[in-house]
Amino acid sequence: MWKRLKYWVGMARTAWLLRRADSEETMQAARRALSMQMADARGLPMKIGQVLAGMDDDSDFVELISSVEPWPLEKIIPVLETAWGCPIHDVLSDIEESTAAASLGQVHQAHLRDGQTVAIKVQYPDIAHAIAAEMRLTGLMPGLGPVKRWQFDLDAYRQTLADNMAHELDYGHEMRAQQAFTAGVSVPGLTVPTVFKTWCRPNVLMQTWCEGERLAAAATWPLTERLYLARTLMMTLFQSVFVHGVAHGDPHPGNLMVRHDNNSVELTLLDFGCTISIEQDRRLALLKLILSGRGACTVNTVDAYAALGFDRDKLDFIAERLPQLNRLLFKPLLEDHPLDVKQWHPGQEAADLLGEERWWFRSAGPADLFLLMRIFQGLTAQLSVLDVKLPWWPMLTLAVPETIRQQAMAWQPVHQADNNTHHNVLQAHSLKVEIIRAGEQDIRMAMPASEACHLDELIPQESRQLLQQRGVKLADLQEEVMAQGITPRDLFSLDDGKTRYHVWLE
């Protein structure tokens, strides 16, 4: 564990230098250094680096996808022989050195005794123990900044990360996910390698060998072929999310291969270690949000987002703006004409609409939401790489049968009994915080009134010390609020001659 801690400390220092970089040259150098540190550490740090690389082949983190030094074959053969319980040549006629290393393992091309060409993914020895140590380290990470102020559920995020890593470390789980995806998703132009169940183990995955190039190579293809490939990518996502209910959750460039010849275009999807399950209630709620944005039906947006796993109490605070936010988030699916994804900036538009309160929406989301968001972000990045524009809604109607769209139209939320009694006594609507420096309003925040029960987590340390000096005890104030009810009132005002603090319930 201490060795892994050393890696994390080194990367934290490099990340700190990256944030303080005062020139583009310094920033690029820091990024390259961080990339190589992550590659050297492998495991969880490298996995994070792959997320940073995204779909951009020009990223400084692309080293983590395309050119990490694999382990030599002599270190891998004993792993295979132990997993199979026999000499390697009882299974294979030959096996080549790896040219494709990843965060948890690496891939070798080989031939079975009957001549079939296969790809063998082998997990690094002891990587599971390294990941376990790193997951323990994540438990030491503090909740700072927006994470603390806006009440993100860090435990839920850690658990989601732990569950996801456990699945990725189990190649048996990946094998089953790959087989289920192949059986459930059928899109023209899409291929998924066939797994050889007989030779798959928890640390070994064998599948058919697939030829192809990285997605970036398709940027030079004729427009008709790029459009066909984009159509395949889009329909694969829509069908897997809304029909199959299980989506490929890791859209970085190393997991896509493309090829074209004789007017045939083919997309191969690799690596099913990270898959996202979307229960029927969630996908119907998601589809109904899209349909309501198109004017095809009406929906209580708070109910629909709550069905997706959002915290209803936090959503109630931005409920009036939620329909408008919904239209921003699903803009590509609300229009019938092709959309240029390079001109679509939902994050900035949401920030313009909600301001600081965007953190309530983000913190209200379920911990696994970032996985679902990542695959949609992956699609927009893929379309950008191909430099094509397609109409999203017509593609969705091709991928999702009318019967499922009708189910979504008829979907109604199942309301759960609310055991929280504070709703019965909640009279104030908002907790307001105002900080004025040098006679000018500097900060003004509003949040749900129930946050008055967590003042000790909202007020910065330096302000808490000043309050204590002035005789204001936050613990006593919180107990008073919980005992007397959350009613409109001043909680405290403080003026140290330079800065004035005012906190009240309204």
Image: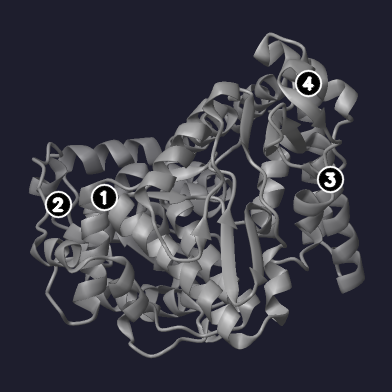
Residue that sits furthest to the front in the current view:
114
Q: What is the CA distance from the residue labelled 4 to the residue labelled 2?
A: 48 Å
Earlier residue among tags 2 and 3: 3
Q: Residue at x 61, y 33 (%)?
A: 138
- Give residue 46's quadrant in the image: top right
Measure the alpha-carbon separation of dots 3 and 4.
Answer: 24 Å
Q: Secondary structure at mark 4?
A: helix
Residue 69, image x, y percentages: 88, 41
Marks 2,3: beta carbons within 8 A: no
CB within 8 Å, label 4 to label 1: no
Q: Position of residue 257 (x, y in %)?
A: 65, 59
The three-letter code of the residue at mark 3 reads: Val
Tell me, yes or no, whether the two marked residues, 1 and 2, touch with CB atoms within 8 Å.
yes
Q: Can you say whether 325 is above or below 310 in the image?
A: below
- C-alpha separation, residue under disc 1 versus residue under disc 2: 8 Å
- Residue ID for mark 4: 2
Label 1 crowding class (10 Å Cα cut-off): few <14, some 14-19, many 20+?
Answer: many
What type is the residue that disc 2 sits on? Leu
Residue 301 versus residue 290: which sits nearer the camera? 290
Q: Which percent across, then down, holds residue 100?
A: 78, 44
Q: Choose the circle earlier in sequence order: 1 or 2.
A: 2
Residue at the spot x=21%, y=74% of the render? 291
Location of mark 2 (residue):
426
Badge 2 element? loop
Please tell me whether mark 4 or mark 1 is closer to you in this view.
4
Q: Are marks 4 and 2 in contact (CB under 8 Å)?
A: no
Secondary element under disc 1, as helix, strand or loop, is helix
Report which quarter residue 55 is drawn in: bottom right
Question: Is 239 above or below relative to 387?
Answer: above
Residue under label 3:
68
Query: Dividing the image into 4 quarters, which one contains the N terminus?
Result: top right
- Where is mark 1, residue-wise? 450
